[in-house]
Amino acid sequence: MKAYRADLLDFASAPAWGDTQAEGAVRFRPDHWLLVDDAGRIAGAQATEPAPGVEREDWRGHLLLPGFIDTHVHSPQIGVIGSYGTALLDWLNDHTFPAERAWADEEIAARGSAHFLDALLAHGTTAAAVFPTVHKVSADALFTAAHQRGMRVLAGKVLMDRHAPDGLRDDVAQAERDCIDLIARWHNRGRASYAVTVRFAPTSSPAQLAMAGALCRADPTLYMQTHVAENRDEVRWVADLFPEARSYLDVYARAGLLHRRSILAHGIWLDDNDRAALRDAGAQVAFCPSSNLFLGSGLFDWPAMLAGGATVTLASDVGGGTSLSMQRTLADGYKVQALGGHKLTAWTALHAATRGAAEALELGGEIGSLEPGRLADFAVWRWSVTPVDAERQRLARLKGHLHEQVFAWMTLADERHLQATWVAGRKLYEDAVFAAPSSAAGGRG
Ligand code: GUN
Ligand code: ZN
């Protein structure tokens, strides 16, 4: 058993939209001890000192959260973050596809996957739904690197058999063989799950979409991930390519790709019928605010999703997004909602990035909260790192409004605030500047 002293924050249930109190949903336990057993599972939390002999780490004065869950991110796109000057379709052709082509090489895919997962951990993200590339080796490399770290990942070889340059296309038969082999070797192995990964409707032929749908039907425990209705030019292109479909989302629905384990990134340009289809299928939309702002894609309407009964999670969408930091993602999410006349509470945002995502992925028994029995995926954060956010925290604390304090933190914090990250009870990242306090020392920050 090991005990960690910090301000513990997680969620018991979903906070109501706009409710800054959210009593009952928010579980804030200041200066408590989180207990982790030797199997790397959370054993409990208590205000009192652990029994003598229990090993301890004293992070007093720090914030401890469940590891963040990024429900949509691209491992090979770290190298194209912050690429100037284009909207989605040109951005793919000018920056993204050239970068992805290199991942046909096993060595590049292995090194890149390790770099990517270590970067997630260095941002306090312990679980992710990941797009590697069209190359089978890129999926193998990602699963291997995640397995070595004990990380929870959902991923799959990207399917794209048309409208992509040479070196980035598969074909239906080869793609099917690759998927079947990857599923056999990685689905439900350790903490990996296979996600049938359709890049987006324009880059898969109807035959490939049908093959992907058949894979999902054959095994309902598989995930499915793709992009939908991100950009207006993209939506028009899909309407031209699939005139028989009622909408962009309907292309996926008709192919059997819309189900309770489907993750659809963006979903900006959907209508009420689409939202009802998402609700009926139990599928989730991954809201990618940083990417949507950076690529000028549009303003996602979260309350419309809620009204339609569809589930929303949060995602960085790097490299369309400009940071792996989930705090930055949430802060951008707040701003996008504000432009639509809505206010996103820190509670709804942080819940969606932890327990909400875990439950949407049907992984609530494993990740997303600090409840006993969950694997101990968590991160310890400094409340402030600069004179500006230190003063903001001091004033919020004086007022004694927890939401104000946590909202200011969510808005101002990023990876500089991260002290350390644990995966299944193992510390896999530690800030090099602020070393761990000894068990006798008080916390910093
Ligand atoms: N649509 C198809 N591929 C991509 C991608 O890599 N990033 C984003 N943001 N949208 C996409
Ligand atoms: Zn994406």
Image: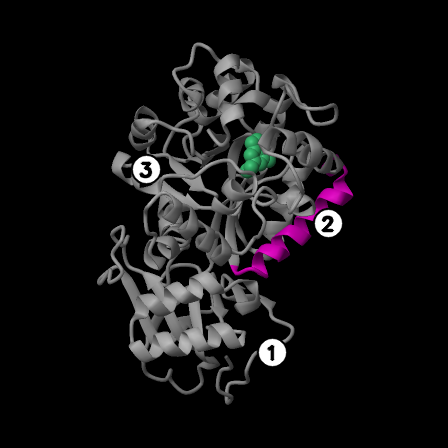
Residue at the farthest top position? 244
Q: Is residue 78 inside the magenta stretch?
A: no
Q: Quick one: label 3, few (<14), some, or many (20+) residues within 10 Å?
A: many
Nearest to N terminus: mark 3 or mark 1: 3
Comparing 181 with 359, the one in front is 359
Nearer to me, 433 or 283:
433
Residue 190 placement (x, y as % from top left)? 52, 49
User: Amino acid under label 2?
Assistant: Arg
Image quarter of the N terminus? bottom left
**Total number of numbered discs in the rendering:** 3
The answer to whether residue 437 is left or right of residue 60 is right
Tell me which amino acid carries mark 3. Answer: Met
Residue at 47%, 56% in the rendered image: 68
Spatial distance from mark 2 to mark 3, Cα to Cα?
Answer: 38 Å
Disc 3, ligand 2: is the CB inside 8 Å? no
| The magenta stretch spans residue 114 | yes
Label 1 SS: loop
Q: Residue at x 29, y 71 (%)?
A: 401
Asked whether the beta carbons under mark 2 and mark 1 sit within 8 Å of each other, the answer is no
**Residue underneath mark 2:** 111
Figure quadrant, ligand 2: top right
Q: Secondary structure at mark 3?
A: helix
Provide the secondary structure element on which disc 2 rests.
helix
> Which mark sits nearer the N-terminus, 2 or 3?
2
The answer to which of marks 2 and 1 sits earlier in the sequence is 2
**What residue sits right under mark 3 in the picture?**
305
Q: Residues within 10 Å of mark 1 (few under 14, many from 20)?
A: few
Residue 281 vs 58, above or below: the answer is above
Q: Is mark 1 within 8 Å of ligand 2?
A: no
Tag 1 residue:
435
Q: Nearer the viewer, residue 150 or 318?
A: 318
